[in-house]
Amino acid sequence: EDQVTQSPEALRLQEGESSSLNCSYTVSGLRGLFWYRQDPGKGPEFLFTLYSAGEEKEKERLKATLTKKESFLHITAPKPEDSATYLCAVAPSGTYKYIFGTGTRLKVLA
Amino acid sequence: ETGVTQSPTHLIKTRGQQVTLRCSSQSGHNTVSWYQQALGQGPQFIFQYYREEENGRGNFPPRFSGLQFPNYSSELNVNALELDDSALYLCASSAGQGGFGYTFGSGTRLTVV
């Protein structure tokens, strides 16, 4: 069965304290892996798409990496405005749906 | 370029009633997908429409149905509402039926009492 597991469930960081969020996945075939940011009461906001193992993408303080079993979202020197829930999703081969993890709730303290 | 807009933003319904949620897709997008997000959970795929045809469905019962119109806007209909249907309903649009590059709306918060 296709599934996505994110860890940790919640993370509290001091401003400037770098860390990584993990997304492990099991799929029969991977069309793509996606990272989204979601603020309370809002829809997910697209961050990155990764297609194959070894791929990396960067945007400001965020960097996403992909292996055959998992993806990491690295946050360098976070700021309070980076506080949000970060969702990982996979698109299995042969379907159009995304399978989402339950997210990591990140809180960055000033 | 406008994004994805959903209406209403909040809704309270009674168990057993029917509800219709609406979504206007982003300009240039011809694919619409609907997701249900329960509190503290990730979004779950309900179904996808491409050029007015349903081309994918998740594990939701038939009382969840939808439509896509020629202008690519969409409706989600839920009949015989149950308490467990309380959730944030998200609409996402993309260009092409592959579903990549989803843009999500802000959602409709449905509460069933």
Image (cartoon, coloured by chain):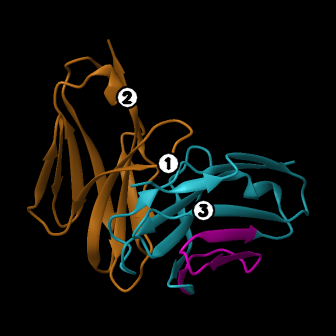
Chain colours: A orange, B cyan
The answer to whether one can see residue A70 in this image is yes
Q: Residue at x 46, y 37 (%)?
A: A39
* Tag of residue A83: 2
Q: Looking at numbered disc 3 in the image, what kind of residue is underneath it?
A: Cys
Residue A110: % across, % down? 32, 11
Label 2 crowding class (10 Å Cα cut-off): few <14, some 14-19, many 20+?
A: some
Which is nearer the eye, A57 or A5?
A: A57
Q: Residue at x 28, y 63 (%)?
A: A33
Q: Is residue A57 above or below residue A40?
A: below
Residue B22 position by quadrant: bottom right
Judge depth for marks 3 and 2 and give the one in front: 3
With B87 as the anchor, is A96 left or right in this view? left
Q: What residue range appears in magenta?
A: B54-77
Q: Chain of mark 3?
A: B
Which is nearer the eye, B97 or A53?
A: B97
Q: In terms of secondary structure, where does tag 1 sit? A: loop
Residue A60: % across, % down? 16, 36
Q: Is residue A36 above or below residue A12?
A: below
Q: Looking at numbered disc 1 in the image, what kind of residue is underneath it?
A: Gly
Q: Chain of mark 1?
A: A
* Tag of residue A43: 1
First of labels 2, 1 by sequence position? 1
The answer to whether one can see residue B37 in this image is no
Q: Looking at numbered disc 2 in the image, what kind of residue is underneath it?
A: Ser
Q: Label 2 to label 1, Cα distance in Å?
A: 15 Å
Whether B60 is among the magenta residues is yes
**On the image, numbered disc 3 is attached to which residue?**
B23
Q: In terms of secondary structure, where does tag 3 sit? A: strand
With B74 as the anchor, is B55 left or right in this view? left
Judge depth for marks 2 and 1 and give the one in front: 1
